[in-house]
Amino acid sequence: MELSECQYKNIYILFVASIALLLVTSIAWSSTNLGNGFYDHGVVAPYSQRRGIVSTVDNQGKNIILMWLMDFRGCYELLKIDALTGKTEEFTTPFSPDGDAPYTSILSSQNKFYAHFNSHFIEFDVRKQSFTFIQETTPKTAMSMTEDDNGVIWSVTYPQSALVSYNPHTGEFKDYGQVYKQDWSQYPRYIAADDKGWIYFALGKTASQIIAFDPSTARALPVIPESDRKYGLAYVYRDLIGKVYGNSLEGASDGWYEFYEGRGTKIGSHPLINKKPYITRTQDLFHRSFPDGEIIKIFDLDSRRLVISKDYQEIRDLHFNYSSEGPLVLSMGAAPDGTIYGGTFFPLHFFSYNPKTDQLLSRLCYGQWNTVASQNDKVFIGGYSKGLLLEWDPSQTWVSTEKDKSGCNPVFRYEGTPEINRPHKLLPHMDGKTIILAGTPDYGLTGGGLMFWDRETQKLQILKHNEIIPDHSTYSLVSLSLNLILGGTTTAPGSGGIKLASEAELYLMDLNSKKLLWHQAILPNVQAYPDLCLAKNGLVYGISDSKIFFVFDTVKRKIVYQSNISEQIPYRQGPRVFITSPQNIYILYSDGIAQIDPETYKFTRLVTSPVPITVGGEFLDGRIFFGSGSHLYSYVVEPLQPQNKKQAPTNLKLH
């Protein structure tokens, strides 16, 4: 699913022990001893993300703000804020979001707020201050919504263009199912209705298309000839004259169509655009204006601050509050300064935990930190979207990242798009100077590349997938020597792309020439190798499809041991299934931790976790750190020696 990039700004952080808002960047926590060696270090970022916000009035004519809120659970509520006082009211989502959230919403002409996510269409009646209609639908999540001239609400969903309509006047709901199917996941980002009631929606990314839909017959007609379909998104909009206009490629200056009563006519250029206004957009919907001319000037979910202006003058500076369980922990690693750091998913935050002081730090960050790792005294981040590469110096002051701006920390280095869009692995090579980034490609594409950056020479090189293994993306990497790396691939395409390869492969690459020395689908029917780990004896431990554990001899180029994994293991875009300490190699289950015997390769379960393990982590000072939902946890797996007791988990502040 399409995700928006993190906005860059200085932020307020809420000091948990205080009733006042302070301009601070750290929060003192008290870790909780869960027993049996486990510690809960708390929510790493106690904030939520808005997924559509509108300014309107209630049944008494008071200015109010409505917004869908998301944390690690998905869209868990609709928040109402009184724009005069800042008082809030929370309306719990009346179905399980299951991690999903709105990717579009609409405030109708009847002052009702709609969304469609996790296969549920939902109406909130502002006048009644309640959810007044909920209907389960064909999967799954609306990418665009509109209102026709009769007041009927329409939405079209990812991943296979399922269409629904709801008439709020009669209560009639129609689920037309998937009206246009492709062998890839579709993003129907635009929808419009002409004044005769025909519906048109535009989709992409693998190949653009516009669908004309006749509600009277439930017939869907593709209107863009196959020869005119483009990589990317098509576009449609409703014009004030009652017709719908569209293009096979969003942003194109020519190639326009005029649509009316289901017929499409090519008109070439279309310079005069008069859109009919609707209060709708993607998940970034932010309708700031109230009917009386007041405007939302500042709205910040982190600081819980709302500023209202009118006639270019600030008239109210308000504090509001809301409940949140925080965003999902997405990645983590151990920094050179002895802290655990990482990133979260919706909202996008950086966090850092200091085990010595039992203190968490959280702030907004640039991009979605999918995969992180350290080399020497620096930390490197592989981020979504556009295959970001960032460099962070933990010893220096944090300065919010801005692309192409000097003096930032983390500093923006490069983008790997379109060869890399979603990073899955960042490998600081054992040579101490090379950073390698790998992942899946841009939306609608198949086959991901590799980014190589030499920190000494500042040389950047990006390989395309057909220079490695065509139609594959690299999912896992491990350094074998100063000039040799082992990679594991996935057959998964970029989001919305077409899977073309039949089996994932392992490969050996010479780091100097960037040429493959060997590659093979070493295990039959495997689609991904999510994690690799170099053992002390030079053999490589690996995971395939999260089902098979194997041991690979890189010299003989063959598997010397394999066994089925009976336990479920955690999965993320930058997975860390294997956890290495100076003495041992561990593997994370979704419900516990096991140790791998270096002689027999057998797993010995050490402990069952009191919480689900949702993201793999890092070994630091005798503990394995991992994520569960929005919380950071640790497990004491190798108690420190007595001389290091001052750093031991038993000295954490407990309650």
Image (spheres, grey):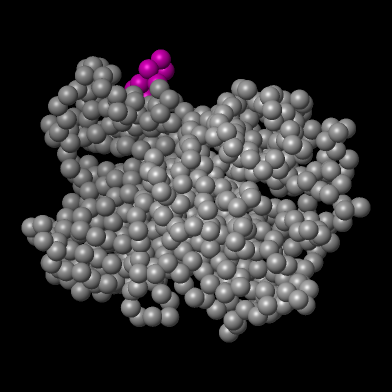
Does the image show residue 316? yes
Q: Considering depth in this image, is 13 or 406 the residue closer to the camera?
A: 406
Residue at image location 40% in from the left, 22% down from the top: 230
Q: Is residue 96 magenta?
A: no
Report the quarter where the C terminus lies.
bottom right
Q: Is residue 75 visible?
A: no
Q: Give the percent coordinates (x, y) of residue 316.
A: 16, 69
Give left or right: position of 1 versus 209. right
Q: Up-down: is 356 above or below 69?
A: below
Q: Position of residue 125 (x, y in %)?
A: 25, 62
Q: Which residues are magenta?
A: 220-229
Image-based side of 578 in relation to 206, left or right: right
Image coords of residue 130 (percent x, y): 29, 67
Is 224 contained in the magenta span?
yes
The residue depicted at 42 percent of the width and 57 percent of the height is: 364
85, 77: nearer the viewer: 85
Q: Nearer the viewer, residue 623 or 151?
A: 623
Q: Quadrant of residue 80?
A: bottom left
From this viewpoint, which residue is outermost toward the front? Answer: 456
258 relative to 151, above or below: above
Task: Give the total number of marks visible in the rendering.
Answer: 0
Q: Residue furthest right?
A: 599
Image side of residue 478 versus residue 331, left or right:
right
Q: Give how far across and how far down residue 487 sits, in percent.
A: 70, 36
Question: Which residue reaches farthest bottom?
Answer: 655
Residue occupying the point 48% across, 36% down? 415
Q: Quadrant of residue 617?
A: bottom right
Residue found farthest to the top: 227
The residue under the point 17% across, 43% down is 277
